[in-house]
Image (spheres, helix red, strand yellow):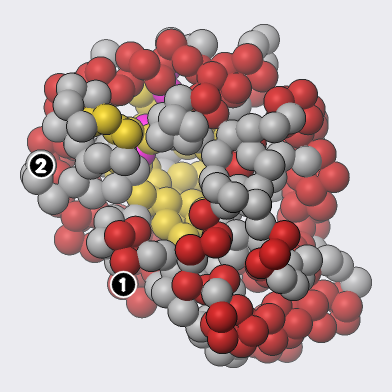
Amino acid sequence: MRHINLRDLDVSRIGLGAMGMSHGYTDSGTNEAESIRTLHRALELGVTLIDTAEIYGPYTNEELLGRALTGRRDQVVLATKFGLVSHASAGPWNLDSSPANIRTAVEGSLTRLGTDHIDLYYQHRVDPNVPIEETAGAVAELVAEGKVRAFGLSEAGPDTIRRAHAVHPVSAVQSEYSLWTRDPEDRVLPLLRELNIGFVPFAPLGHGFLTGTIRSIDDFKEGDFRHGNPRFTGENFQRNLRLADEVQAVAAEAGATPAQVALAWLLAQGDDIAPIPGTKRVHRVEENTAADGIRLTAAQLDRLTSLPAAAGATHTEAGLRMLER
């Protein structure tokens, strides 16, 4: 597995998003043994960047990683996130990036993860009620204390990134980015390259859509967030199937799977990008990591880049209000 730098963090070119092992998707949280096997297989394949958050569960995903990484902590660049749990008052799914809340959050994450430090600590969503300078300053204190190695932001816009970076260096920004979510290209990626900040795309397979295996939303069980996602409903869903079919066509030409082609396209966008495809299955992590060895031709890359935008918003209205792009 090739490696890149997220500023000063050395990470595998392809990471692993652990959220779906506990939260958000059909059958999440139903097979801990398989999830742990998947995490261990990822490490065997050279994956070093593992991503979680306190809100996943909430809390249960960090606890799962804590159990899975016992005796293996030194093999991992461990990333987690704060800011979507208000510990002193409103609870989960409420923005709170105040310094006091960050203090509470980090201690909980350290305990659940079974570690004395977090390698990459992201603000999960920008909190409009707390100046980003205060949030960055609080994380800077944790870095000075050795509890955090590096500071990250998730779904932050250029102004927030620049202001945070002026207080404490931002090592990575995590945002949704894939063949069907191209939003970061115009405003965020140029700034990250100006400031030497790494980029970590989440949902690089379009929440599974780009694998070509989703042909009907009837397969989603209750609790799967894709039920309410505009891209997975009605006419949008049918239009987006044609986009997935185009990825499948390139995959057939390249002798790869659609997932590998979607990831190979992302890797070709720059040496400062480390996508974190999520899975809870061993055979999928084997498939995804093999994308590191796929080299698409210039014509194939151009064909993929020229695909039309996906139909529908990436999130519900409530979710969109939490994004800065």
Q: Amino acid at mark 1?
A: Arg
Visible in this render: residue 305?
Answer: no
64 sits to left or right of 155: right
Which residue does the image show at 69% across and 86% down from the upper left? 242
Which quarter of the image is occupied by the N terminus?
A: top right
127 sits to left or right of 55: left
Residue at the spot of label 2 = 130
- In percent of width and height, residue 237 lies at 60, 79
Q: Nearer the viewer, residue 234 or 287?
A: 234
- Decide: few, some or many residues near mark 2? Use Cα within 10 Å; few <14, some 14-19, many ≥20: some
Magenta-highlighted residues: 117-122
Q: CA distance from mark 2 to mark 1?
A: 23 Å
| SS at badge 1 | helix
Residue at the spot of label 1 = 187
- In percent of width and height, residue 47 lies at 68, 37
Q: Nearer the viewer, residue 89 or 81?
A: 89
